[in-house]
Structure formats: structure tokens, C-alpha cells
Image: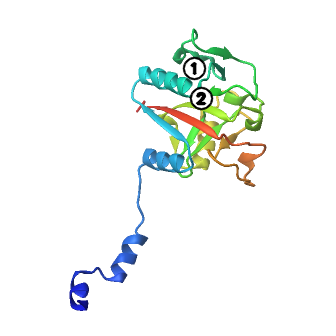
Amino acid sequence: MNFLKKIFSIPVKETKEIQKQEVNLSLDDLFVHNFIEKGGKFLYCQQKVEVKENLNKILLENNWEELLVLNKNLTTFLNTKKVTVHKEFTKTKPVFSSCEHLIADHGDILFSSNQLKSTKLSELSENFIVFAKTSQLVKNTGEGLTGIKTNAENALPTNISSIKNYTTIKSDDNFLNYGNNNSKNLYLLLLEDL
């Protein structure tokens, strides 16, 4: 029997080498993998119609009839006959927002004062729906910060922070997490635009 095991088994050395091999994922695959691993809910959309359909399904699934909309352009995705849209910042209403960038290497979502004004993430609801485009994917936080600086027309935005954890709250000394109460229930509507 041992003779057959030796013939048909893979040597331990080869098995360890296979396990050590690094897997190189594309930017979007890396982000989605890290985002879902943290507990985020991801919905890929090829057209704007799909964004609207998926958004309605999210609202229906959670019985949300009110939303805090942080970007007035996002109201085009909403059926305002079924959903009451609020513009005042509050901690009780689910948030529908855009973002600055999607950070692939950690699956984080980066925001600034362009979305949040001067409100900290901890002062908003634990329920988030984020709309983003594939062109907002960047490899790491450094590229995200560079992108914010590049896109700034007149002045750099402030209040730069990120949502990093989607199921549990972990303490992190990173300056991007100051005052950040991470969302426990986060949906990402990602629109293909490349």
C-alpha cells in the first residue's frame, strides 16, 4: 500500500510551493474579493437602469421608505413616490451616497467633504447604500488620496475618511478612521463605465 501512496501522492515540497504562490487579481476582482470578505454587499450594474432596479430591491428588502441622499444627482435613481428623500444629516435614516474612490487592496470606500460635508461617518446611520463607478477603483489609499488631489478644482476637500469594516467595528489608529463608526449594513451599487 505504501508503494502506491508514494507513486500517486504529490510531494510535500510541491504542495507547499503551490500554497506560497501569489495570486495576482485584477483591480476590480481584488476590490470585490476584499469588499465581500469584510461583509459588504456588492451589486454590479452594466447600465443605469440596473442601478435603479437594484436600488429599489434594496429598499424593498429592508423596508426603507426614507433615505438621506447626500448627492442630489442620485435622486434620478429613486422613485420619489415610494421613498421620502431627506437632505438633512441624521443618524436614523439610511444613507444613499456617492464616494471618492474604491480602495482595491483593502476593499475600503473613501469619502470626503464632497459627500459628507463636515459630518463624520459616526454621525450617520449604520445603513449605507453607496453608488460608484468602475473608474473610481484605485489600488491603494495613496492612489485614492492622489486622485482626490487631482480631481480638486479649486480647493482640496476636507473630512477625508473611509469605511473599512462592514460587519464589525474594529479600532484602528489610521488617521482616515478618526471618529469613524463603520457601517454594519453596506450595499455597493457599482456601475460599469469603462
- The residue identified by callout 1 is 74
| Residue drawn at x 39%, y 28% as measured from the top left | 46
Residue 71 place in picture, x, y as percent = 63, 21
**What residue type is disc 2 on?**
Ser
Q: Is residue 153 above or below residue 177?
A: above
Name the mark on residue 180.
none
Residue 1 place in picture, x, y as percent = 23, 89
Q: Quadrant of the C terminus?
A: top left
**What residue type is disc 1 on?**
Leu
Residue 104 seen: no
Residue 73 seen: yes
Residue 3 is left or right of residue 118, and the answer is: left
Rendering quarter of residue 84: top right
How many discs mark residues in the rendered view? 2
| Residue drawn at x 25%, y 87% as measured from the top left | 6
Secondary structure of the residue carrying numbered label 1: helix
Q: In whole angstroms, how far apart are the C-alphas of marks 1 and 2?
A: 8 Å
Q: Categorize mark 1 by other alpha carbons within 10 Å: few (<14), some (14-19), many (20+).
A: some
Residue 187 is left or right of residue 12, and the answer is: right
Residue 15 place in picture, x, y as percent = 36, 76
Name the mark on residue 98.
2
